Image (cartoon, rainbow, N blue to C red):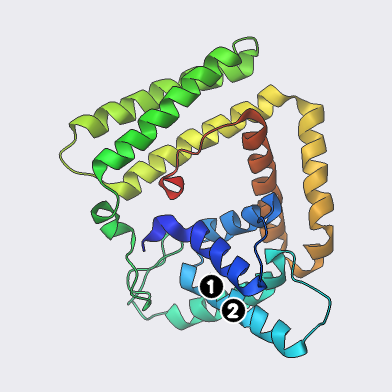
Amino acid sequence: MNYFNYFTEIEEEFVKRRGRHMLVSPLDWSLMEMWNQRGIPLHIVLRGINSSFDGYDERARRGRKVNSLFYCQQEVESLFLEYCESQVGSGEESVNGNGNGNGNGNGKNGPGESSSVLSQRAITDHLVEQLETLKRLSIRHAGNEALKETFERVVLRLEQIVEDLQTAKSLLPEALETDLTMIEEVILDGLKDGVGQEPLKEIEQEGHQKLRAYKKSMGREVYEQTVNNFIARQLREHFKIPRLSLFYL
């Protein structure tokens, strides 16, 4: 497994420990994205999930089920703090923005090894498919000036990336991921402009409402980032925006 499976591994572990299948909510996905953005290694998140459920099982709360990944949030944060403290001055592991280090002790590949798992052809095909979707969206939203301009911009940028990939002799996954992340940020800014202030405000209020029960246990930065991730996910789903990031390949 490599770092592209970050979200899938977390989702599967949570569902497995919960005991029966359930759909992971958009709010839970926002939390996973926040963990990833902060560089929390996958093995730390999985350990936090298992530790949380171990404590839950010991208390044997009959008739009650864990319905959200937020149940594990405090344990993940605590373990990540311990992890960071253990790494100070070690010089043996650096954590990248994708949640994995170069020697995390879990026998899993880091981003530098991803090209052996994801071929250059597979990545190119993935981006070509998403490029065609964005072109269709540009036509569909031609009447919305903000969306039309956004899609035209990102189509041009993605076309250049695809062209470079098709002629490149080697692949640099981390550099490519940076480029794709910047394009996704352009798309998100365009969606916020295109959807209008009132609908955007309603989505933000929904995010705050859903997070109300967890706000006290979250730091301000973590809370705000999770709300922003929720807004982004709702906008992408509403406009049916494809994910460009290699995490979703």
Q: Classify mark 2: helix, strand or loop.
A: helix
At label 2, the amino acid type is Asn
How many residues crowd mark 2 within 10 Å: few (<14), some (14–19), many (20+)? some
> The N terminus is located in which quarter?
bottom left
Residue 98 visible somewhere in the drawing: no
Residue 46 lies, with reference to residue 167, above or below; the image says below
Question: Residue shown at 69%/53% (left/top)?
Answer: 25
User: Residue beneath label 2, please?
Assistant: 50
User: Residue beneath label 1, please?
Assistant: 46
Q: Residue furthest bottom?
A: 58
Residue 157 visible somewhere in the drawing: yes
At label 1, the amino acid type is Leu
- Distance between the alpha carbons at the discs numbered 2 and 1: 6 Å
Residue 77 at x, y percent in the picture = 62, 72
Q: 63 or 230: nearer the eye?
A: 63
In the image: residue 24, left or right of residue 157: right
How many residues crowd mark 1 within 10 Å: few (<14), some (14–19), many (20+)? some
Asked if marks 2 and 1 touch (Cβ < 8 Å), the reply is: yes
In the image: residue 102, left or right of residue 29: left
Residue 170 lies, with reference to residue 71, above or below; the image says above
